[in-house]
Image: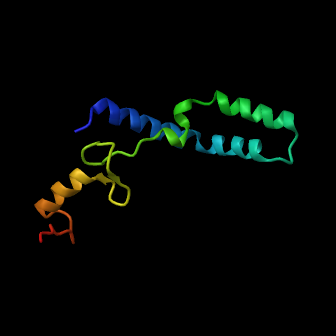
Amino acid sequence: MAKLSATENNNRKRKLVKRFAGKRAALKAIVMNRALPMEERFKAQLALNELPRNSTKVRIRNRCGVTGRPRAYYRKLNMSRVALRELGNQGRIPGLVKSSW
């Protein structure tokens, strides 16, 4: 099990990303638009820098939905390999069978 503080911190980052997504996208569009004057693009860049750092999408860490483990994460299943194996061995995941040879 991951520390509760780590998972809560990650959840706060997710909320911030959702809250500032529209504003961040609009400012980034202005910054990337080469047709606009340099001064306007620079002002947009400064405004972008004023937003909270944790409102960027790259700061979110994918974590297991069951245990909160940050490594070996399967996006499709929203869980780590350890949790997948445990639930598979218990027969709680349909279609997943333990292999042996």
Between 12 and 42, the one lying in front of the other is 42
Does 9 sit left or right of 50 as displayed? left
Does 15 sit left or right of 36 as displayed? left
Circle count? 0
- Which residue occupies 25% across, 48% down? 66
The spot of residue 11 in percent (x, y) is 40, 38
The spot of residue 28 in percent (x, y) is 70, 43
Image height check: is 84 above or below 98? above
- Which residue occupies 15% across, 69% down? 99
The spot of residue 68 in percent (x, y) is 29, 42
Image height check: is 56 above or below 81? above
- Which residue occupies 12% across, 69% down? 100
Where residue 49 sits, quadrant-wise, is top right
Name the image colouring.
rainbow
The spot of residue 51 in percent (x, y) is 62, 31
Does 57 sit left or right of 2 as displayed? right
Image height check: is 59 above or below 49? below
Where residue 53 sits, quadrant-wise, is top right
